[in-house]
Image (cartoon, rainbow, N blue to C red):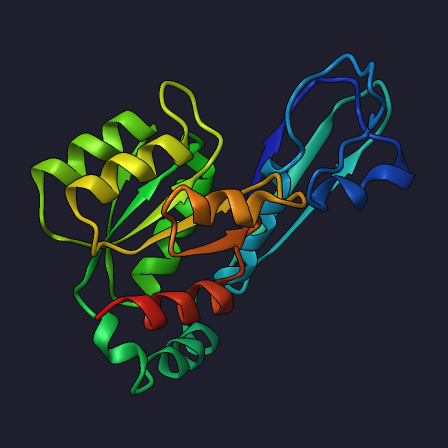
Amino acid sequence: RLKFYVEDTGIGIPEDKQEIIFEIFRQVDDGYTREYGGTGIGLSIARKLTELFNGKIWVESKVGAGSVFYFTLPLKKSKITDREDSDRSENSDKLKGKTILIVEDDRASFEYLSVVAERLEMKSEWAKDGKIAVEMCHASQSYKLVLMDLNMPVMNGYEATKEIKKIRPELPVIAQTAYAILGDREKAIAAGCDDYIAKPVKQTELKQKLITYIN
């Protein structure tokens, strides 16, 4: 195994908070008046990425003395190969070589989704906002499906989906959002999305939706 680490000289993390920071939407300070920003999804994505490669991630920290984040990755691919073999089922064969467009303003989220696509032997391209996504769909007919983040700058996912459906009404669009609140699904479907998936996106769930909507 290879071990990597990132060390900082920040405020540190209390021992009783060192596990919850890897949970979705959780931070050391969860109060409405917290001093530091962020949505609390970065470390959750980091954990999913390391586990996707059969690795582990953890933190060692002392309050007032900074933190050290570690993660490991295996040198041998034996377990990953077993999982890859399971992905090469009859149903997932039709995904091989297909290209999807990932519309996502967060690089970490895009990289996670692109890794999942790569494991399914698919290709992926990145649009950082809805406006760019519309332009890319207008310029290329190669995309077989669009993974559409709903909350983005410049043009949000709802508006982008409406514009894409005007250009290519047959192109499947799956909405994805970190803010999975009541009514989001209905609003996404009303905007023209074919389906909906909540962040953090689970690999198995995404795979099934790709199989369902890609011809």
Q: Furthest residue to the front?
A: 190
Tell me: residue 175, above or below residue 119. Answer: above
Residue drawn 59% across the image and 36% down it: 42
Image-based side of 86 in relation to 134, left or right = right
Which quadrant holds the C terminus? bottom left
170 relative to 167, above or below: below
List x then y, in percent, for residue 115.
Answer: 37, 54
Residue 47 versus residue 137 in the image, above or below: below
Residue shown at 62% from the left, 44% from the top? 183
Please state which of residues 207 and 160 is positioned toward the viewer in this rendering: 160
Q: How many marks?
A: 0
Query: Residue 151 at x, y = what percent?
Result: 49, 31
Measured along the vertical axis of the image, is residue 71 above or below residue 136?
below
x, y (%) of residue 125?
Answer: 24, 44
Q: Quadrant of residue 4?
A: top right
Q: Looking at the image, which residue is at 72% across and 46% down? A: 23
Residue 74 can be seen, yes or no? no
Residue 127 shows in this picture: yes
Q: Closer to the camera, 106 or 1?
A: 106
